[in-house]
């Protein structure tokens, strides 16, 4: 599962491009001598360090000189055509707006069901489900390690009963759903599939994605369950099932979001995410899947941070780099294989508890970057998320932010409106080249899994996070309301209150389920799953049988724990 090396970008500048660069260099030298230098003698620049959010220095001025190696067709092209720098569709948002998909989940399945219906009623166009910590770690709500954690960072789902409640009154054949779950992703997906079947929806009509990105758990988020090899086996089981039976379903959303939330730079987010994507592709090819049937099933998930231009450049570089690697190294023939589609979420780590209302401004800038960067779907964080799960009012403002961008700002009227900017094009190329340099380092370590085991990714992110925090502590980087422009007394917005009896109700419901279900069917389904896990058979059909029998999440996850064991991470330092 070693990541294949990325192709080098051929530097073949056209004569006209070289000539423009030479003229720009001459003009720049003249401007500096005749205009800039005398002005600086009278009016010095601010003492700020001019750098991106990722601490990349930003030049005073960008000109055609910075694009001497740039080729219009090779590096930028046209929307819907290789290398897809300008977007994956020929008409982009003039044809269809991005999917507005707010990340939602808290408390009981019934409480989250009400929130989902609230958002759909206010114009949300796709669903995105957050799960609580016990669910993310594959434990039932009544497990001893789940006490006090029910429903706090997402909805608690312990069985098919909860999935049925979660989507009660929501026809899953008419709306796409994204589910952010990784370690026990295949079990949760099985619940979703069986719930859809019970609604009468054919497999071929169910659309959406399950995050299912276990590699970034080892790298950043740390919600892993099993060792890397069997975890990857379960991921590939979902690939195979989706390719064969569910044409509208993306079985993975390769996530850079959590890598960035852990403190990475934008380039690290870009490089590590695409490297993970290639590792998944290699694993699927080893199973016997073909590149042109698997590559179109991979979707991606990026962060949208504060630095507008750095984020736009990151998305453009991601599309271009993915297209080049898939064509030149993997021999992909289908256009769909070369297209990198991605969801974006605004940066949770950028939100401040201080002066929480101004988070609306941060989120608006981040969402603008995602749209200008050509995202396919978008979640906008709520202003109160540094304090609690979002209230109804806060989540409505977050949705309205997207709707104003779509319908009032004009940014969706034309495709890739910032193309041709000397700064943006230069930054896009720079990020692509730096990402490829990371590919080389990962290859030298033996690929993604080997690099994880050697703590390469973890240390790179930890070092970047330390540098960023140090810049804040030393006031080299201003965070409004935190280290500058502070208030002595800060007003907190009204916070969401969940059902205080939710955990008790959930535990009681689990007890009733275990008494009322056919436990012989449960035991038979779990034995079938264990046998498949011990061998080489695809586990998805057995997980679906477990779901139909109302086996709980903890029961199915315990089967995998017995067969695969649990993973313990080594220290980064």
Image (tube, rainbow, N blue to C red):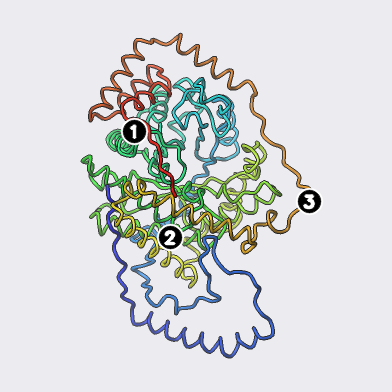
Query: Residue 20 versus residue 405: which sits nearer the camera?
Result: 20
Q: Secondary structure at mark 1?
A: helix
Query: Residue 202 versus residue 53: which sits nearer the camera?
Result: 53
- Residue at mark 2 to residue at mark 3: CA–CA distance: 42 Å
- Residue at mark 1 to residue at mark 3: CA–CA distance: 57 Å
The earlier-in-sequence mark between 2 and 3 is 2
Task: Count residues near mark 2 (Cα–Cα under 10 Å), then give few for <14, some for 14-19, many for 20+.
Answer: many
From the image, tell me which residue sits under label 3: 488
Query: Residue 101 versus residue 326: which sits nearer the camera?
Result: 326
Residue 218 position, x and y percent, is 41, 43
The earlier-in-sequence mark between 2 and 1 is 1
Q: Secondary structure at mark 2?
A: helix
Q: Which mark is residue 204?
A: 1
Q: Is residue 458 left or right of residue 508?
A: left
> At 51% across and 60% down in the image, what residue appears?
54
In this view, the mark in front (1 or 3): 3
> At 45% across and 86% down in the image, what residue appears?
23
From the image, tell me which residue sits under label 2: 316
Residue 170 position, x and y percent, is 50, 28
In this view, the mark in front (2 or 1): 2
Task: Count residues near mark 3 (Cα–Cα under 10 Å), then give few for <14, some for 14-19, many for 20+.
Answer: few
Residue 176 seen in the current view: no
The earlier-in-sequence mark between 1 and 3 is 1
Q: Secondary structure at mark 3?
A: loop
Residue 548 position, x and y percent, is 37, 19
> At 33% across and 57% down in the image, what residue appears?
323
- Residue at mark 2 to residue at mark 1: CA–CA distance: 31 Å
| Residue 357 versus residue 231 in the image, above or below | below
Residue 426 position, x and y percent, is 45, 70
| Extreme-front residue of the structure | 573
């Amino acid at each position: 599962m070693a990541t294949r090396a990325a192709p080098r970008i051929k530097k073949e500048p056209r004569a006209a491009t070289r000539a423009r660069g030479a003229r720009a260099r001459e003009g720049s030298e003249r401007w500096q001598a005749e205009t800039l230098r005398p002005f600086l003698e009278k009016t010095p620049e601010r003492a700020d360090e001019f750098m991106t959010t990722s601490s990349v220095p930003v030049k005073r001025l960008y000109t055609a000189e910075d694009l001497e190696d740039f080729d219009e067709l090779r590096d930028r092209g046209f929307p819907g055509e290789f290398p897809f720098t300008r977007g994956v569709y020929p008409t982009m948002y003039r044809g269809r707006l991005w999917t507005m998909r707010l990340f939602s989940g808290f408390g009981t399945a019934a409480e989250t069901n009400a929130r989902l219906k609230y958002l759909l009623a206010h114009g949300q166009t796709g669903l995105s489900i957050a799960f609580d910590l016990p669910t993310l770690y594959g434990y039932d709500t009544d497990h001893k390690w789940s006490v006090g954690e029910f429903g706090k960072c997402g909805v608690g789902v312990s069985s098919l009963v909860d999935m049925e409640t979660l989507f009660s009154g929501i026809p899953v054949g008419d709306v796409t759903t994204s589910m952010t779950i990784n370690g026990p992703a295949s079990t949760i997906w099985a619940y979703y599939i069986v719930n859809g079947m019970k609604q009468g929806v054919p497999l071929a009509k169910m659309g959406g994605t399950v995050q299912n990105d276990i590699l970034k758990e080892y790298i950043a988020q740390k919600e892993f369950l099993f060792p890397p090899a069997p975890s990857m086996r379960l991921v590939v089981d979902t690939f195979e099932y989706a390719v064969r039976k569910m044409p509208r379903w993306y079985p993975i959303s390769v996530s850079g979001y959590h890598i960035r939330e852990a403190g990475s730079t934008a380039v690290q987010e870009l490089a590590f995410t695409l490297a993970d994507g290639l590792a998944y592709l290699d694993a699927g090819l080893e199973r016997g899947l073909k590149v042109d049937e698997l590559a179109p099933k991979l979707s991606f998930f990026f962060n949208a941070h504060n630095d507008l231009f750095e984020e736009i450049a990151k998305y453009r570089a991601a599309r271009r780099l993915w297209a080049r690697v898939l064509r030149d190294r993997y021999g992909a023939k289908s256009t769909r294989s070369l297209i990198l589609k991605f969801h974006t979420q605004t940066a949770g780590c950028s939100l401040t508890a201080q002066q929480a209302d101004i988070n609306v401004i941060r989120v608006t800038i981040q969402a603008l970057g995602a749209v200008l960067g050509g995202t396919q779907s978008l979640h906008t964080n709520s202003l109160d998320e540094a304090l609690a799960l979002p209230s109804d009012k806060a989540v409505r403002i977050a949705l309205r932010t997207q709707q104003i961008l779509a319908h009032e700002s004009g940014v969706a009227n034309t495709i890739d409106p910032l193309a041709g900017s000397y700064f943006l094009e230069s930054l896009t190329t720079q990020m692509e080249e730096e990402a490829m340099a990371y590919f080389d380092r990962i290859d030298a370590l033996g690929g993604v899994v080997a690099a994880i085991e050697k703590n390469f990714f973890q240390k790179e992110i930890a070092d970047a996070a330390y540098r960023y925090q140090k810049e804040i502590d030393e006031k080299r980087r201003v965070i409004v309301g935190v280290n500058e422009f502070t208030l002595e007394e800060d007003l907190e917005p009204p916070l969401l209150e969940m059902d205080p009896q939710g955990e008790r109700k959930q535990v009681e419901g689990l007890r009733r389920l275990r008494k009322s279900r056919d436990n012989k069917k449960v035991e038979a389904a779990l034995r079938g799953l264990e046998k498949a896990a011990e061998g080489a058979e695809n586990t998805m059909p057995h997980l679906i049988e477990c779901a139909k029998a109302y086996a709980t999440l903890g029961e199915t996850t315990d089967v995998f724990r017995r067969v695969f064991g649990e993973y313990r991470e080594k220290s980064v330092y």
